[in-house]
Amino acid sequence: MGRRFDCSDPDQRTIGLMEAAAAARRGDLLVLPTDTVYGIGADAFTPEAVTKLLEAKGRGREMPPPVLVGTVRAASALVDDLGPYGQDLIDAFWPGPLTLVCKANRALSWDLGDTKGTVAVRMPLHPVALDLLKETGPMAVSSANRSGAPAATTVDEAEEQLGDAIEVYLDGGARPPTTPRPPSSTSPPPCRGCCGAARSPWRSCAASSVTSPPTIDRRLTDD
């Protein structure tokens, strides 16, 4: 089984973040807490790692993962254009459970799957996730569960479903947390341009353009 670190213990948190970052650099998988559910993460710029992620979940390239970032600057480097509303949404709702779907920066060398030229990007409101992402850079992250199974809300549930496919498990307690939103923020706006909630949270949406706002979705991950 993968190594597990209790992030409520300062020493284990420090070691766990170091080990998780090292695992990501090697192209291995890790499980991390977010402000919604637990996520399974891989280096977004290592195609073999993204393939491992999809295989661990039991899905194909037609269901590519979103990308989590630790800074707004990192997000800006991933997209071709935020459109006229993207920066306002970021200022209002990041970090937090708001995913923006934009046209991906065509200069980037990566392979998340069949994205049709888009990328779903989010900055989570969770201290462990943010510290890790600032160390690793952008990570492909999907919910830590086998496809079709319930998303993991504890590290035990993630480990039960994913087992030895994961190198490092970061235990941040039960999800969802009670992490407060910054005082300047309110609830995220309703989803724009998305189909029904039973469908993918971002692949069913149209890509953003200069003349239209980025597609948005409240959820971090899909099933």
Image (cartoon, rainbow, N blue to C red):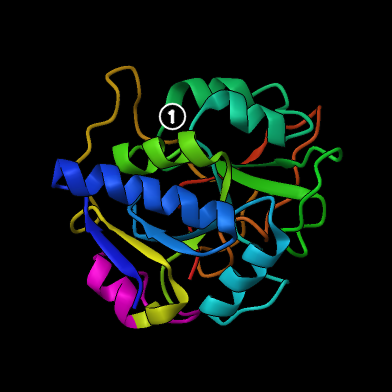
Quickly name the residue at label 1: 93
Position of residue 74 measured from the top left corner of the image (x, y, whole percent): 60, 30
Q: Nearer the viewer, residue 39 or 10?
A: 10
Q: Is residue 124 above or below residue 84?
A: below
Tell me if residue 109 comes above or below residue 60 in the rendering. above
Q: Residue at x 77, y 41 (%)?
A: 103
In this image, 73 relative to 132: left or right?
right
What percent of the width, then of the height, locates residue 220? 46, 52
Question: Magenta residues?
Answer: 146-160
Quick one: 84 or 196, which is closer to the camera? 84
Name the residue at 40% across, 37% down: 130
Is 52 placed above or below 9 here?
A: below
Neighbor class of circle 1 (other Cα within 10 Å; few <14, some 14-19, many 20+) is many
Q: Residue furthest top?
A: 184
The residue at the point 42 percent across, 67 percent down is 167
Q: Residue at x 81, y 47 (%)?
A: 109
Please state if 206 lies on the left or on the right of 96 as rendered. right
| Residue 35 appears in the figure | no
- Residue at the left extreme, as displayed: 9
Examine the rendering and report whether any part of residue 160 can be seen: yes
Q: Is 23 drawn above or below residue 73 in the view shown?
A: below
Quadrant of res 129: top left
Q: Is residue 133 magenta?
A: no
